Amino acid sequence: MIKVKDLTRKYGDFVAVDNISFEVNEGEIVGFLGPNGAGKTTTLRVLTGFSPANSGNVEIAGYDIFENPIEVKKRIGYLPEFPPLYTDFSVKDYLSFVADIKGVESRKKKEYTEYAVEKCGLENVYKKTIMNLSKGYRQRVGIAQSLIHKPDILLLDEPTSGLDPIQIIEVRNLIKELRKEHTIMLSTHILPEVSATCSRVIIINNGKIIAKDTPENLSDKLTGAVMVKIKIANDIEKAKIAVSEMDVVKKIESNEDMLEVELKNKEDISKVIKNLVEAKADILSVVPSSASLEQVFHHLITREEIV
Ligand code: ATP
């Protein structure tokens, strides 16, 4: 759906996006994660045809953005970081206006508007003036304008920025719901955002892509090992001895009723459980843990590349 190859965007001598390449497949929801100033908005603006590039190729739904910007714009819905809402319009009038400027055919306008209103849960505020809406509802209106022409792809720039915790959850649920019908790429500098909503993450820092993977794989790659916490109801020292001699175990520690085992591979968890059962340990719980996305992110932007 989205193919970016060797894309570079400079502002004067400053390289904001430095030779980046990535792909987003149909039906994916990909998080574009990076600290402030990393180059996320610049990249999204090139992808939407709002900004030129210095070099590289961008193909959206089979169309080259630089050769066929109109065809690309028909297939993309864009939520900018600061959505251009006309706050003295009602939601109804604003969406009608956006549908017109996006070229929605008049015979489809009603159906498409109903689609956007229903998806974004705007039924109760449809006739209200945008100025009088909460920030969360304004953001929903912003998302509704991005999908009113039923684009294949949604590009959302910091979709939950400035919202309160309840609004954040609501907008995240809305985005997950939209995934059924749209391929989505969202930018964020908030780590829990990608864990909560995205199937894949592309991490950008100083204009360069430093990682592309699922959130889970990134954690595993960083630790290079898997940690498992096993809660034991009876003799913890006996349980520890049963496991400590195993080849697959890199490290083991006991702490009150908890064994903390470091394994070489995730698949070895079952072997450890088997040994514990044979040693008559009463297992209360088994919880695998790996590095949090927060640790991965910090590690990546402060140290090495793991693409
Ligand atoms: P944020 O999360 O803060 O929005 P971002 O990852 O979206 O950051 P960009 O807005 O793409 O980052 O900016 C990347 C870099 O390019 C920053 O250093 C920014 O100051 C610079 N930049 C962005 N727009 C311009 C511009 N029009 N002229 C000059 N420099 C710019």
Image: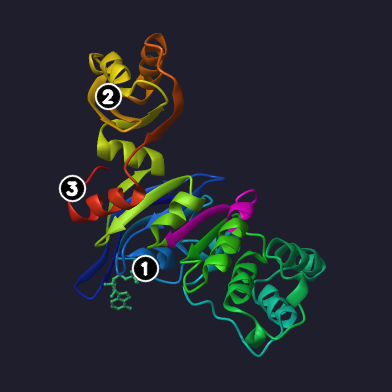
Q: Is residue 268 above or below residue 43?
A: above
Q: Position of residue 293 (x, y in %)?
A: 35, 49
Colouring of the image:
rainbow
The amino acid beneath tag 1 is Thr
Between discs 2 and 3, the one toward the N terminus: 2
Q: Circle 3 sits in a helix, a strand or a loop, which is it? A: loop
Q: Disc 1 beta carbon < 8 A from ligand 1?
A: yes
Q: Is residue 126 above or below residue 247?
A: below
Q: Does the magenta segment cover residue 176?
A: yes
The amino acid beneath tag 3 is Glu
Residue 241 is marked as: none
Residue beneath label 1, please?
42
> What range is drawn magenta here?
175-187
Residue at image x 38%, y 22%? Answer: 269
Q: Closest to the observer: 250 or 41?
A: 250
Q: Is residue 193 above or below residue 279?
A: below
Q: Quadrant of ligand 1?
A: bottom left
Residue 304 is marked as: 3
Of tags 1 and 3, the one toward the viewer is 3
**Location of the C terminus (image quadrant):** top left
Marks 1/3: CA–CA distance: 24 Å
Between discs 2 and 1, the one toward the N terminus: 1
